[in-house]
Amino acid sequence: MSRYIATRAIRGANTVVAEAEALLKAAIADLGPDTPVAFTNTAYFLPVNLAFMGRQIAKLSDMVPALEDAKRLLHPVPPENMWVPYLGETMDSGMATLLAEEIIEGIRFARGQEPQPITWDGTYIPTANFVTSDPMAKAGKRMNGPIDDIQLRAWGIQLVDGRMPGFAALIGCAKSTEVAVQIVRELQQRSILVFLSGSVNGRSIIHQLMEAGVEMGYDTYIIPFGTDTMATIYPLGFAARSALTFGGLKPGMPREILQYNRARVFAFAIALGEVDDLKYATAAGAINYGFPVVADTVIPQILPTGITPYEHVISMPFDDIEGKDDIERARKLVQRAIEVRGVKIKVTEVPIPVPYGSAFEGERVRKSDMRVEFGGKSSRCFEYLRMAPFDSIEDGKITVVGPDFDQIPPEGFMDMGIVVEVAGRKMQEDFEPVLERQIHYFVNGASGIQHIGQRDITWIRISKAAADKGFKLEHFGKILYARFHADFGAIVDKVQVTIYTDKAKMEEWLAKARQAYTHRNERLAGMTDDSVEEFFSCTLCQSFAPNHVCVISPERLGLCGAYNWLDCKASNQINPTGPNQPIKKGTCIDANFGVFEGVNSFVQQASHQAVQDVSMYSIMNNPMTACGCFECIAMVIPEANGVMVVSREDPSMTPAGMTFSTLAGVAGGGLQTAGVMGHGKYYLTSRKYLSSDGGFKRVVWMSSFLKESMKEEFKAVAEREGDPNLIEKIADERVATSVEQLLPFLEEKAHPALTMPPLF
Amino acid sequence: MTPAVQIPIEKWTGKVREITLGATAADGGTRAKTVTVGGENTLPFLSFEGSIPHSPAVALEIQDHYPNDWSPLLKEYWGDLLRDPAAWARKAEEVGADIIVLKLISAHPEGDNTDAAHAAATVKAVLGATGLPLVVLGPGQADKDNEVLVAVAEAAKGERLALGNCEDKNYRTVVAAALAHGHLVVAKTPIDVNLAKQLNILITDMRLDLDRVLMDPTTGALGYGLEYSYSVMERLRIAALTGDSMTQQPLICTVGEEAWRAKESKVNTGVPAAWGDWKKRGIHWEVLTASTQLLAGANIVVLRHPDSVARIKQTIASLMAE
Ligand code: SF4
């Protein structure tokens, strides 16, 4: 905690509480103790005092004990030579400040001085009238005053349900009118409510906006509360009322109400211009709510995260912000404030000239219908998603480097690279491939666009119809920006897309991408079950196999092939209550079979006690259950002392005397059957494949589909197993559909399983 | 001599949450009576094994727009009442419903696309016409649900309506509206135990107490997925009784909607003569669907035909008898 800030906030609090006391005394003397006090059009009395202290202030005399609450929270200004972490004192002072400020506003209401009159050459027409005859409002000669309950309900529910991202309190006066307007526009664009208060040397952002002719009011999401710092109490009262209304909270529950705001109301303050004691004190009050403060002047920062989810106080001296002009600096200031508070931007529509939706995902673009293609036989195309440092990218920036395709003849081709850079507080490098794979689905959602492949074998076609409707390269960026925010907003805060068609640039990035692919492959290969503390569950299939749990480890993917360990990890970040839960491995009970205490207890609970023990690496001893989605079924062939693996694509008879579909009935349903197991194709290539039963060498028969479609992978496995000809020794449906045919084949090829220790 | 048969008794550790729909004047509402469901600590109707403090309730469904797609049998019975939700509700109360389920279909963007004020006015009118507790369902399109349910919640503050459907896509808004105005929600998930649990967790995260949440597990009609929904309901209920807190919500099933959609009940053209009397068949369809779901654990069955109400009430009464 900055001692400087603490000192000034504590001093500010002492001053404002004393001021409130003096004003109250005078008001009681002038008007009498029973004079009613009310913020108009609200049933929440003075909401901050109500929410945090449970006090229903209805007349001047009710303020006397309320002021005592504030006084109890005051602390002496720390002496010069004392160095303690003043956080607690500062937070208390902040709260005292808010209570006192609200009392002062209440007194002004009682005296008819609130809402603040507009005494200068400007107008504001409030949306709501306070009393039936509200001549000042009609003449446009008063500020807004507190937000009425009707509007509170309309906005509050949207803040709580996430339709509205949050609110920004702008306090003080911007560098120039131009900057003031830009800041407000930036916020408006993102549907963030803008609450205005405060001034510097008598000039307020409210003056600035009025001069610029910015329309204010409920409809434009810009509310001027008052030209002094005190008026900031209205937005904070609004936040307290939201919690009371929509959070199921009761007055007098300060902790819960503050926590609720911290967790659900994405608000922040921007202090524009010089920060005086009262502003420090008020800011301390806002920090209580978990609302961070960004100042455009030099002030000490409070970076450690604690009360606010992120930084508490950030200093961004306006003229030092990097940018070509003040407009850009204003943009960056707002961007930073949004990041600090973690306000999530919602993108609901994909702004492209062709229809968009998952219905178009399967669409094919035939050569004759094609306007242009990227990748395939004649050109190169790649896509690469990487995590970038937070400040190095700009959210929503889409750039096309090089020519668009308008110069390419119809049915022609060109090189292209799509580079997506993302940043987010919860983003991890490990999620890069998970997100990158989504590009396929996202791009395919556009009508008239076909996307095949990934990485540097991406192949994209744009149909003539789509091009005619105005589809351009930048639209890939628009799609990706919108979808990454919409679907992965939990881990991604910023998305920037660059599309390279410029030859040199494209090649430069292709090289970078290839380096990254290699790096990822190595990382994936190096990721072993032993190297992690957690596996993940998948219970998605419990909808039809109620007791089935997939346990997914780095070396064993889900049996449907759709989820590997990284996918689960990312999915858990996105949807923490969803079907992919972390499973702490816990004590290893048997390293050979792959039995872990944590896995067992998770499976017991998630299988509703149907399954007690699971071996990760064995088909003989408590194998993992299967739901029915398996890509392959492995089954022991006792006569051959090995296992056969049949894939879903293979309709033929197997040496087990059953086809895939008959076998599926035996393997599925969430039951453990020794000797039968469903699994994902890529599990076959894992070092842990049936490792306790002898590993891949046990495979004596395998559908030719697998052999063909995973040729390269199996070649590597054979090398690893020290038997380069291993795959040829494995029979398939072309040579054996019965045990009688299988055995001679194995004998002839001298399959290693024949000489391995007996399975039984 | 009585045979010495030992009835096995299962000792469950959990129980279904007790939930009250509707509020009388004493509790800030205007209902003449309230309905409490849930509270049982045993499987349906096994009163020898545990306690079942409340009978399942029977609701009748009404809509705020003439239901063009309903079976002619239903149209014939209700007649012109179908054009007046208030009168329809009054009649539903007369024929023995415990609860009224009002579906605001006119708000559907592909239908009349009526607005929030219209929805609020309809609910007010229905509240005025009947003293029964009300379940109010939106048109089933997330944005429109949000729009009308928020207005309804506000207009009927304190009535302890059940607002629905609260789904994955729009639960935040519906829950916030319920929180703000003292209502319950109907949490609907597509036939899946885990999704049902998850939605309850998410609702709890928003601080709505679980004694204000009903679960609609999405159910099928006889011949149209009834077995599947039976098994999901059964699993939910067994999980509840074994102590899984997030599955202990009373179940509400939209029986009428499903049963009257079946070909067997909806139409009588081009069907084999062996199917017999159409009207009997239609009622059978609804009654069989409802009674099956009651056996699976339904706490509220929502019906469409008054004849079914009478029969289901009778069934419940005999199953509840000691
Ligand atoms: S089969 Fe796939 S989707 Fe189903 S539970 Fe396993 S990993 Fe999840």
Image (cartoon, grey):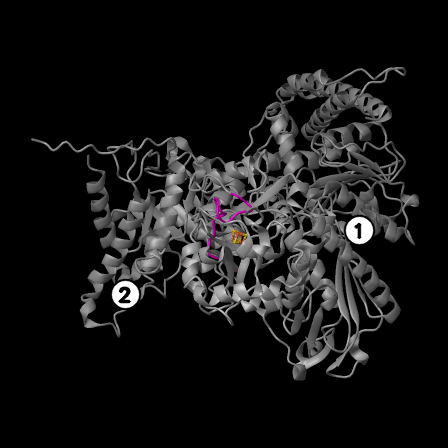
The chain letter for the residue carrying disc 1 is: A
For residue A328, say whether it is visible.
Answer: yes
Relative to residue A118, is residue A508 drawn left or right?
A: right
Image coordinates of residue B123 in percent, x first then y, are 42, 49
For disc 2, the marked residue is: B264
Q: Is B24 on the left-hand or right-hand side of A602?
A: left
User: What is the secondary structure assignment of the residue under circle 1?
Assistant: loop
Q: Position of residue A163 (x, y in %)?
A: 62, 49
Give the mark toward the camera: 2 or 1. 1
- Name the residue: 51% across, 56% down: A642
Q: Residue at x 64, y 80 (%)?
A: A366
Q: Amino acid at mark 1?
A: Ala
- Between A717 and A53, the residue placed more toward the observer is A717
Q: Which residues are magenta?
A: A615-631
Q: Are marks 2 and 1 on the same chain?
A: no
- Whole-percent x, y for residue B210 in the image: 46, 36
User: What's the residue type where badge 2 is placed?
Assistant: Glu
Q: Which residue is mark 1?
A: A388
